[in-house]
Image (tube, rainbow, N blue to C red):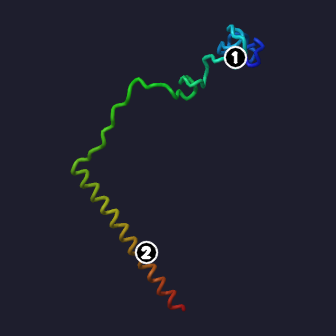
Amino acid sequence: MPWGDRTGPMGMGPRTGRAAGFCSGFNTPGFMNPGFGFGRGRGFGRGFAWRVPTNYPAPVQPYQPTKTEEIADLKAEREAIENERKAIVEDLKAIDARLKELEKKK
């Protein structure tokens, strides 16, 4: 009973809420009683924070690639790094050319 007036939540009548007010024999309104309700630290609130899992998932084993897969991965990584190196060398050449061009204009 939100106001202790024996009307229940939203005026729906007695004992339609959590039964913690005057209708259940308490001498104070429901919000003042330690009745069972949401958010009381018992794990039955919205977050289920204190619920204990009954079964645990199996441990995950890390993936172990075969030697052929590892060789293929390393070759692909080497090729990617080599392509990056070529791009960097080209960028350095372009920067050097621009520097020479700007130094001539001085």
Structural distance between the alpha carbons of marks 1 and 2: 75 Å
Q: Residue at x 60, y 17 (%)?
A: 36
Q: Residues within 10 Å of mark 2 (few under 14, many from 20)?
A: few
Residue in the image at 72% along x and 16% along y: 29
Position above or below: 80 against 17: below
Q: Amino acid at mark 2?
A: Asp
Q: Residue furthest left?
A: 67
The image position of residue 58, as x and y in percent, is: 34, 31
In the figure, residue 92 lies in which quadrant?
A: bottom left
Residue picked out by circle 2 = 91
Q: Is residue 70 above or below residue 26?
A: below
Name the residue type under label 1. Gly
Mark 1–mark 2 CB contact (< 8 Å): no
Q: x, y (%) of residue 89?
A: 38, 75
Question: Which of the 4 quarters of the picture holds residue 8?
Answer: top right
* Residue found at x 24% / y 55%: 71
N-terminal label among 1 and 2: 1
Q: Which residue is mark 1?
A: 30
- Expressed as whole percent of the image width and height from the top left, the position of residue 106 reads 54, 92
Foreground of the two, 89 or 22: 22
Question: Which one is nearer the viewer's eye here, 41 or 18?
Answer: 41
Where is residue 2? Give x, y as percent.
Answer: 74, 19
Identify the residue shown where x is 63% and y is 18%: 34
Q: On residue 55, which mark appears?
A: none
